[in-house]
Image: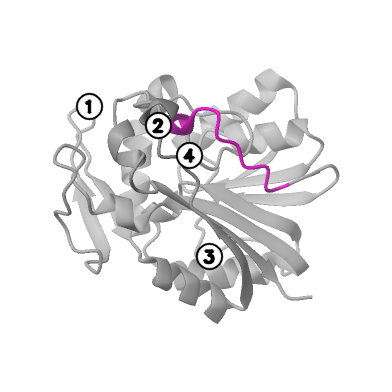
Amino acid sequence: MTNEVRAWWEATADYFQSTADVAEGADWTGAAYGDIDLDLLGDVRDREILELGCGGGQCAVGLAEQGAEVVGLDLSAAQLAHAKDRASERGVSVRFVEGDVTRLPFTPESFDLACNAYVFQWVGDLDACFRETHRVLRSGGRFVFSVPHPAYEVVDSESERVTESYFDTGRYEIHHEEVETPQVLYRHTVSEIHRALVDAGFVVEALHEPGTDDPEAYDPGPWGECTPSLMSKLPAVLVVEARKSA
């Protein structure tokens, strides 16, 4: 599982970082959402933050620039090379660690906050990931993340018809012309995400489905992968706020 995902990111990291329009800081909804903003982390100064799946470091570096003490974890050495370059260019200190979100290499109660955006579609074992995240958070620590909305994922963007079963979860592959290695992803229903959080010991405080019914508010994205007309009818992203009980 992890090796398949790692292989794709190792093969595509340079292409992704050179073409994807990834915003700096905590960007929960992606470039396609334009001016829609969710300020979920508040003041992060002096907070110890773990970004799970930090990729090229856009979020980690942005948070460090706001005064946070940030650790960015990713399974791809190629992605981490971009992240380290970005931190150096911006003149901020971020600790980048190569590792697996289902087996975190940190001692218990090391962080005040864990976060990521658009990562868990590459994680098959959410139970292990959420248990590990709960373990490394301090009492009262927050866990904030976003994922592609499971309902949006089963609708064909051209016909705007449901073409796949919402309940067909688990592993699937996507093949890209630009990258020879197949992209391995995982589908999770909203209830599966919620159950895994609760079973890990988290209290789910809020679910957000940001969006608007105005297609003009959306952008097709750097690769034309987003469909504004469909996004104005269905939420394309699910944002979760959870907390480790005090």
| Disc 3 secondary structure class | loop
Neighbor class of circle 1 (other Cα within 10 Å; few <14, some 14-19, many 20+) is few
| Disc 1 secondary structure class | loop
Percent position of residue 117, x then y = 52, 46
Q: Earlier in the sequence, mark 1 or mark 2?
A: 2
Residues at marks 4 and 1, CA–CA distance in whole angstroms:
20 Å
Residues at marks 1 and 2, CA–CA distance in whole angstroms:
12 Å
Q: Which residue is mark 4?
A: 77
Residues at marks 3 and 4, CA–CA distance in whole angstroms:
17 Å
Q: Amino acid at mark 2?
A: Ala
Residues at marks 3 and 2, CA–CA distance in whole angstroms:
22 Å
Q: Which residue is mark 1?
A: 178
The quadrant in which the C terminus is found is bottom right
Residue 107: tell me if it is visible.
no
Residue at the far front in the pictured view: 213
The quadrant in which the N terminus is found is bottom left
Residue 31: tell me if it is visible.
yes
Neighbor class of circle 3 (other Cα within 10 Å; few <14, some 14-19, many 20+) is few
Q: Which residue is mark 2?
A: 13
Q: Number of callouts in the render?
A: 4
In the image, the segment drawn in magenta is 31-41
Q: Earlier in the sequence, mark 1 or mark 3?
A: 3
Percent position of residue 36, x then y = 55, 35
Tag shown at residue 103: 3
Q: Amino acid at mark 4?
A: Ala
Residue at 68% across, 32% down: 62
Labels 3 & 2 near each other (Cβ < 8 A): no
Q: Amino acid at mark 3?
A: Arg
Examine the rendered structure and indicate whether residue 170 appears above or below residue 8: below
For residue 119: magenta?
no
